[in-house]
Image: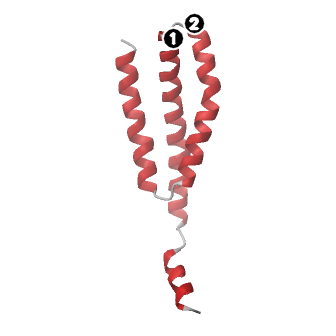
Amino acid sequence: MTVNSAQQDKKHKPTSWLAIFFHITTTVIGGYYLTALVVQFLALGLAKLGMLRSEAVVASALLAFLIYLVILLWAFAERRLLRIFMMLCLFPCLLYLLADQFSR
């Protein structure tokens, strides 16, 4: 075993099953919640721009599949669980506050 391969072994520690479980759970549930709020905000914005409410809801619901896919791909590509948790918890709170102010 060379020194270089020994250094690579130290960098790539195996992840625990609990960390993988939290990663998947946070990504799926947080991504779904974030997607729901983005769709709500998008439908509200499209309705405010003059589109019929029913068409705005359908258009934003169709975009929900793409939004959820992008969120899942980003979250599974990200290695740090703390960053995923912060983005999927803080960004929905910000969107919720914006949608609440925007709907008035």
> How far is mark 1 from mark 2, CA to CA?
6 Å
Return the disc, 1 or 2, that comes first in the chain's sequence: 1
- Residue furthest out toward the bottom: 1
Q: SS class of the residue under badge 2?
A: loop
The N terminus sits in image quarter: bottom right
Q: Badge 2 is on which residue?
A: 52
Q: How is the image coloured?
A: secondary structure
- For the point 53% across and 40% down, which residue is it? 31
Q: Residues within 10 Å of mark 2 (few under 14, many from 20)?
A: few
Residue closer to the observer: 39 or 2: 2
In the rendered image, which residue does mark 1 sit on?
47
Query: Which secondary structure, mark 1?
Result: helix
Residue, x 54% and y 86% (percent of image)? 4
Rate crowding at label 1 as few (under 14), some (14 to 19) or many (20 or more) other CA atoms within 10 Å: some
The quadrant the C terminus occupies is top left
Q: Amino acid at mark 2?
A: Leu
Which one is nearer the viewer's eye here, 88 or 46?
46
Q: Residue at x 53, y 18 (%)?
A: 43
From the top left corner, tell me how far across and down residue 17 is, in percent.
55, 64
Mark 1 and mark 2 residues within 8 Å of each other at the beta carbon: yes
Tell me which amino acid carries mark 1: Ala
